[in-house]
Image (tube, rainbow, N blue to C red):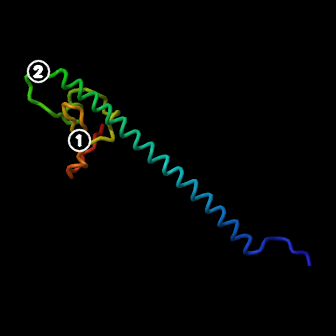
Amino acid sequence: MNNKGFTLIELLAVIVILVGISLTTVMGISASLERRDEKEYNEQVEIAKNAAKIYFSLLDKNSEITKVSVDTLLENDYFDIKKVNRLCKNDTITSSGVFNPVSDTGTECQRVEE
């Protein structure tokens, strides 16, 4: 008898191998996207910190202002809104350069939007 074709076991083995390859690929892509998102967020935090440095350097020496919000920096055109779209309007930066996201305070985040 001439048996041409695959047995059920062989087909299942091929399916299991393909599923394993697919899962590995999806997990790798997912991890890569997470790293990219984190890097993009950190870059936007640095943009906000640099804008805050400029803001504080232009203040009167006798000013008692010690922190500034991302919204205030946006209103005063310290950076383009597209460059900080992952930050919240009420995130703050201190005069010493410390970034304080609202997620740490439990306050609701109002995203920066166009």
| Residue type at the position of mark 1 | Asn
Is 36 left, or right, of 65 in this rendering? right
State the image quarter where residue 93 is shown.
Answer: top left
Residues 113 and 42: in front is 42
How many C-alpha atoms fall within 10 Å of the one at disc 2: few (<14), some, or many (≥20)? few
Q: Position of residue 26 (x, y in %)?
A: 54, 54
Instruction: Write down the quadrant of residue 83 in the picture.
Output: top left
- Crowding near the residue tagged with mark 1, few <14, some 14–19, many ≥20 C-alpha atoms within 10 Å: some
The image quadrant where one finds the N terminus is bottom right
Asked if residue 16 lies left or right of residue 104, the reply is right
Residue 86, numbered circle: none
Q: Residue at left 72%, top 74%?
A: 9
Give the x, y percent position of residue 6.
78, 71
On the image, numbered disc 1 is attached to which residue?
100
Q: Which residue is mark 2?
A: 61
Q: Residue visible at 53% across and 50% down?
A: 29
Q: How far across and down, in percent of the image, does residue 59 sit?
A: 14, 22
Residue drawn at point x = 21 percent, y = 38 percent? 92
Q: What SS does tag 1 mark?
A: strand
Which element type, helix, strand or loop, lies under badge 2? Answer: loop
Task: Identify the mark nearer the N-term, 2 or 1.
Answer: 2
Quarter that holds the C terminus: top left
What kind of residue is marked 2?
Lys
Would you place residue 8 above or below residue 43 in this image? below
Q: Nearer the viewer, residue 108 or 106?
A: 106
Does 58 appear above or below 32? Answer: above
Work out how far the residue at label 2 is from the one at label 1, CA to CA, in angstroms: 23 Å
Q: Are marks 2 and 1 in contact (CB under 8 Å)?
A: no
Determine the residue located farthest toward the bottom in the rendered image: 1
The percent position of residue 54, horizontal first and vertical second, equals 23, 23
